Amino acid sequence: MSAATRRRPLWLLLLPAFVPVVVLVLCVGLFLFFRQGGLEPLRVPTGTGTPAPTDAASIERGRYLARVGNCDTCHTPRGGAPYTGGRAFPTDWGTVFSTNLTPDPDTGLGDWSLEEFRHAMRHGVSRTGMLYPVFPYANFALLEDADLDALFAYLHSLEPVRAEAPANRLDWPASWRPVLLGWRMLYHRPRTPGEVPDRSESWNRGRYLVDGLAHCDMCHSERGRFASLPGERYLAGGIIPGQGWYAPPLTRSTLERFPVDDLAHYLRSGVSLQAAASGPMAEVIFTSLQHLDAADAEAIATYIKDVPDRARPGSRDLVSERSTTAMAGNGRTLYEDHCAQCHGSDGRGRGMDYPALAGNPALTVNDPVNAVRLVLYGGVPPTTALNPRPHSMPPFAHTLSDADVAAVVTYVRGAWGNRGTAVSADQVQRMRGMRID
Ligand code: HEC
Ligand code: HEC
Ligand code: HEC
């Protein structure tokens, strides 16, 4: 061996081993890059392009769709002018602010072309760059051109208002938009619209609305780490981050108790013989779903009643009725004293005024937060055209101790054939500390 070979640096000798590693990393990177849609989504159409349609029918259609998509709730600051943006969305990495959707040319969509709008709605990329997934573009990707064009027509018919959205307050690296390419490569799977051929027209319409414009999975599915999209946990229920509300599964077994008509009525009115809406669901019904036309409400009900159940391994920890009732201690007495006048000694409630607690799976799901919250802070279903004067439930935070609340909630979760687990005074105490929305 010559002296020259012996003096070769170590890294040069190891180079052949690195080459396959580098090639592998590049291949995986390219694969993920193409899986998120390749280069196309990242190229924002520029220029003036097609202007928005201006006919009255498109604008009216757009107004309806904007309500179903709840654009104004997310794009209106609390107490501010509609669609001017600036509503804050807290995330694990800081705060994202929504943008101005009025046709102001400097701060809104005034000089956007229809192509740019369609592109932002489908791919979550605009002249600003890649958009944060708080904006439900993965859902909006399913929208047909005609619906997107109507939405754009409606937004362009609004009064232009100059309103600069506040700069996002995010930690590094989330604050640097290009990092979203990594997120997209890991989690974004462009969805393609399309009908399931062997299902009814109403079922397909329901799926189009639930998965697309109405983005029900934003609350009713739990996201994984780094706000990944639900996938396996599709409509299987989940805790809404930062709010302490549990959105129950929208699947066959939980919704079995609702005939289609009753479920459609619940979506438009906020009440039914089977359940009453509270918290974030009451808000969604108030701002959005009460405006659904009867056919669309029925379509949504038809579809969600047919979503297969997803087993959550290890999370089903049911106890027998007798043992829960025994654990409830003085729960039964408390129930008779404070609750029975509305919900009935038999737990059947009273028509649409007071919801039934017997056989109500939303009440017996593993996570008791909703029931505990309602007993502590009370609640009222939304005021809607179909139910203009809702009855309310009084708060018990000042009348009942943590142990009493735990006992009475444990009682209702276990009585009349209900099969939910017991609730502890500690769980109630933690809920007392939660922010109330
Ligand atoms: C859950 C809340 C939410 C809903 C619902 C929502 N948006 Fe947004 N939207 C946002 C947020 C937050 C942003 C800003 C994202 C960012 O800065 O990365 C945004 C951004 C946008 C953008 C990009 C603006 C720009 O300047 O790049 C458009 C266009 C848009 N939304 C239109 C709509 C329309 C139309 C609807 C109703 C069909 C809608 N949004 C519903 C939260 C929402
Ligand atoms: C902002 C979050 C949020 C969104 C968006 C949302 N929901 Fe809900 N939903 C909830 C919460 C929380 C509950 C539980 C509280 C209650 O029962 O009122 C709930 C309850 C329900 C129930 C009652 C379930 C039962 O078994 O009693 C139905 C049905 C329902 N939602 C359907 C929908 C549909 C359909 C959509 C989309 C069009 C939707 N939700 C969108 C948060 C949400
Ligand atoms: C004055 C009548 C009234 C009394 C008393 C009352 N409730 Fe209610 N309860 C209601 C109404 C109305 C609703 C619907 C609230 C809503 O939609 O926000 C409700 C909702 C509920 C729900 C949620 C049901 C669902 O479908 O999501 C639970 C659980 C509940 N009550 C338990 C209790 C318990 C336990 C007590 C006693 C500590 C009690 N209630 C006392 C009227 C009452």
Image: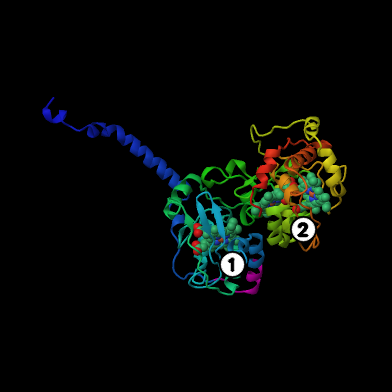
- Residue named by callout 1: 83
Q: Is residue 339 magenta?
A: no
Q: Is residue 107 positioned above or below 21 on the image?
A: below
Amino acid marked by disc 1? Tyr
The residue tagged with tag 2: helix, strand or loop?
A: helix
| Residue extent of the magenta highlight | 52-61
The residue tagged with tag 1: helix, strand or loop?
A: loop
Image coords of residue 129 (percent x, y): 45, 59
- Residue named by callout 2: 269
Q: Residue at x 26, y 34 (%)?
A: 15
Amino acid marked by disc 2? Ser
Q: Is residue 3 visible?
A: yes
Q: Nearer the viewer, residue 190 or 418?
A: 418
User: What separation in Å lies between label 2 and label 1 (alpha carbons)?
Assistant: 25 Å
| Image-quadrant location for residue 63 | bottom right
Image coords of residue 432 (percent x, y): 67, 47
Q: Is residue 237 positioned above or below 41 on the image?
A: above
Q: How is the image coloured?
A: rainbow
Q: How many other residues sit within 10 Å of disc 1, few (<14), some (14-19) or many (≥20)? A: many
- Label 2 C-beta lies within 8 Å of the nearest ligand 3 atom: no
**Quadrant in the picture for the C terminus:** bottom right
Q: How many other residues sit within 10 Å of disc 2, few (<14), some (14-19) or many (≥20)? A: many
Q: Is residue 55 magenta?
A: yes
Q: Nearer the viewer, residue 105 or 297?
A: 105
